[in-house]
Image (tube, helix red, strand yellow):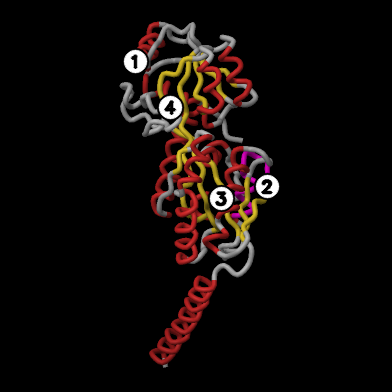
Amino acid sequence: MRKLGWSLFRLVAGIVACANWSVFDSLAQSYPVKPIRIVVGFVAGSGSDILARMVAQRLPEHLGQPVVAENRPGASGAIATERVATSPADGYTLLLMTASSTILPALRAKLPYDLERDLAPVSLLTIVPFVLVVHPSVPARNVKELIALARSQPGKLSYASSGVGATVHLASELFNSMAKVNIVHVPYKGGGEAVVALAVGQIDMYFGVAPSLLPLLGAGKLRALAVGSAKRASLMPSLPTIDESGLRGYNYSNWYGVLTPAGVPKDIIARLNAAIGKVINTPEMKESLGKQGLEPQTNTPEQFAALIHGEIVQNAKLVKLIGLKTE
């Protein structure tokens, strides 16, 4: 009887499993059959919103259904992330995520989601290189000279950020840590205020994005030393990376990517990945993104997952190093 019961259990389990896989296969083959939404964690007109709408405008050519952007601002993107993490795993609700979301787990003890458990990466969209700039009064023409100057005057130089715990803050603290210097943090209420403070000489150094810096660089009010990304920026191709400039291994950028709720069938994720790759890598899209200082860069879901995991680990170490308290 026990053998018969166990055989019957295995038979039923097999039927259920086959039925479930049939459902998933059916979903993947027919997908999509209704509009898709891309949830954005920031207000209309923000960089995230503009990129989401650019992608949403072009995805229907490859998916055959309308794609709309939905703004759910607040809590540094956590509201939008929770919205997607708790949505049905059917591929119709996507998240446009920024690199800042990989900082939140280290800053907030009770997030209503787990970034790696509750979401499934689809693809990276773009890298946003940070440009290391200084005020012209700083007697450093390159990264090596800046590091030497900072080491000779510990605590005298200062850097701006767009806020405590922001990507710019951690990019600067990674520089501090790797270069073994003590450049003092001065937080501002956003990147605009930080750039103005640098231009008038209130602070010495800042990691900014190229489009907002180019007018001031052209006017001689700022001096660019290097870019923080692994590769040079297309808007400033003659500017070396920090890694090339002697601080080997430095690589910190902002970025944007797309995720779905965990549990979305892999075939659907693969279709979304392929469609996003076609959209981002067209000459027209590359040109449009380049004008905004965005470097088009798509990848596989597995590569994107590895990037997210690596940055969660790195940011947790940086948050602990600089003593930021969790909320």
Q: Please tell me the numbered disc located at residue 71.
A: 2
Q: Residue at x 50, y 45 (%)?
A: 285
Q: Is residue 229 above or below residue 141?
A: below
Point out the residue furthest to the front here. 284
Where is mark 4, residue-wise? 236
Q: Residue at x 60, y 45 (%)?
A: 111
Q: Nearer the viewer, residue 3 or 232?
A: 232
Q: Main secondary structure of the magenta part?
A: helix
Q: Please tell me the numbered disc located at residue 55.
A: 3
Can you give x and y, in whole percent of width and height, for residue 6 in the image?
A: 42, 86
Can you give x and y, in whole percent of width and height, for residue 211 in the image?
A: 54, 28
Mark 3: amino acid: Val
Which is closer to the viewer, label 4 or label 2?
4
| Mark 1 in CB contact with mark 3 (< 8 angstroms) | no
Which is closer to the viewer, label 4 or label 1?
4
- On whether residue 73 falls in the magenta region, the answer is yes
Q: CA distance from mark 4 to mark 1?
A: 19 Å
Mark 4: amino acid: Met
Quadrant position of residue 233: top left
Can you give x and y, in whole percent of width and height, for residue 324 in the image?
A: 54, 28
Q: Residue at x 38, y 90 (%)?
A: 3
Q: Please tell me the numbered disc located at residue 144.
A: 1
* Label 4: how many Cα within 10 Å (few below 14, some 14–19, many 20+): some
